[in-house]
Image (cartoon, rainbow, N blue to C red):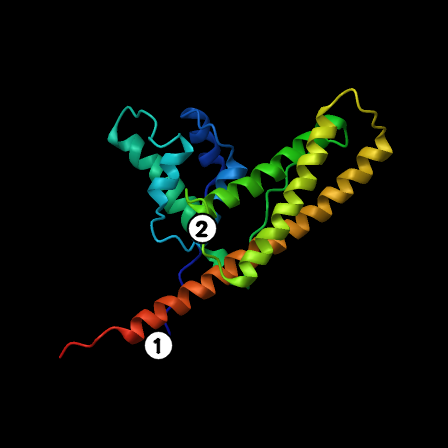
């Protein structure tokens, strides 16, 4: 009989957001998602979910009142969010950035640009896993270059939108929002390209290790 497929892990976003507030996490939820995804894809062998979780609070977990509270936070972030993001290592299940509801105003534009910039920064941080550079396969490396260019454009949008002295009428804001949507699409394509290429390279590497390992009789 064919084995029944396990249902995908679903992260409880509401609960995660509530716990992040409870423990005053300095990293916003949208950035945690991309940081985790980057670390899932990273070729760095030293990477681990627990160290990434600790780094959300600067390297140490926050203070807890009980062991139950520790288990709850780790359960929600690792068993929930981290494991739910591992499914994006398949082409059939691409990763998507958050879709916040923002108003077509200067503040709304600044808010959206900030979220997108933080998402890209989070992905870079997770992928590099604390190292200065990462040994990435060719497609992933090219995709990362594109992400760097997109990040610079989004940072520029955020800077202008945050500066109240710069003129911006509604039609300008609406047009820039459209450009941000296009940059969002490009960001998703390039992030998925990095994840898939790194996943493929890791599988090949592990496969070659498996085939070259001496056999014991």
Give the image location of residue 5, x and y in percent.
Answer: 41, 65
Q: How many marks?
A: 2
Q: Which mark is residue 1?
A: 1
Give the image location of residue 144, x and y in percent.
Answer: 57, 52
Q: Is residue 141 left or right of residue 48?
A: right
Q: Which mark is residue 127?
A: none
Please tell me in which quadrant of the rendered image residue 163 appears.
top right
- The span from disc 1 to disc 2 (Cα, nearest Å) is 27 Å
Secondary structure under tag 2 reads helix
Q: Is residue 51 left or right of residue 187?
A: left
Q: Does the residue at mark 1 contact the one at mark 2 (Cβ under 8 Å)?
A: no
Viewer-proximal residue, 131 or 199?
Answer: 131
The outermost residue toward the top is: 165
Rendered residue at 46%/26% (across/down): 21
Looking at the image, residue 87 lies above or below residue 206: above
- Identify the image quadrant of the N terminus: bottom left
Please tell me in which quadrant of the rendered image residue 217 appears.
bottom left
Viewer-proximal residue, 106 or 209?
Answer: 209
Q: Which mark is residue 84?
A: 2
């Amino acid at each position: 009989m064919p084995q029944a497929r396990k249902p995908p892990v679903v992260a409880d976003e509401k609960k995660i957001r509530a716990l992040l507030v409870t423990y005053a996490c300095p990293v916003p939820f949208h950035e945690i998602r991309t940081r985790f995804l980057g670390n899932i894809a990273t070729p760095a062998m030293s990477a681990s979910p627990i160290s990434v979780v600790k780094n959300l609070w600067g390297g140490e977990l926050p203070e807890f009142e009980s062991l139950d509270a520790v288990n709850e936070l780790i359960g929600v972030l690792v068993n929930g969010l981290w494991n739910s993001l591992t499914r994006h290592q398949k082409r059939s299940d691409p990763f998507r950035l958050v879709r916040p509801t923002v108003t077509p105003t200067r503040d709304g534009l600044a808010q959206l640009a900030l979220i997108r910039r933080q998402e890209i920064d989070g992905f870079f941080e997770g992928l590099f896993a604390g190292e200065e550079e990462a040994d990435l396969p060719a497609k992933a490396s090219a995709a990362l270059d594109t992400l760097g260019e997109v990040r610079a454009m989004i940072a520029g949008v955020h800077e202008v939108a945050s500066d109240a002295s710069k003129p911006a009428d509604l039609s300008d804001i609406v047009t820039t929002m459209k450009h941000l949507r296009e940059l969002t699409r490009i960001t998703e394509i390039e992030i998925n390209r990095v994840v898939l290429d790194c996943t493929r390279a890791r599988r090949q590497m592990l496969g070659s290790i498996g085939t070259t390992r001496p056999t014991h009789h």
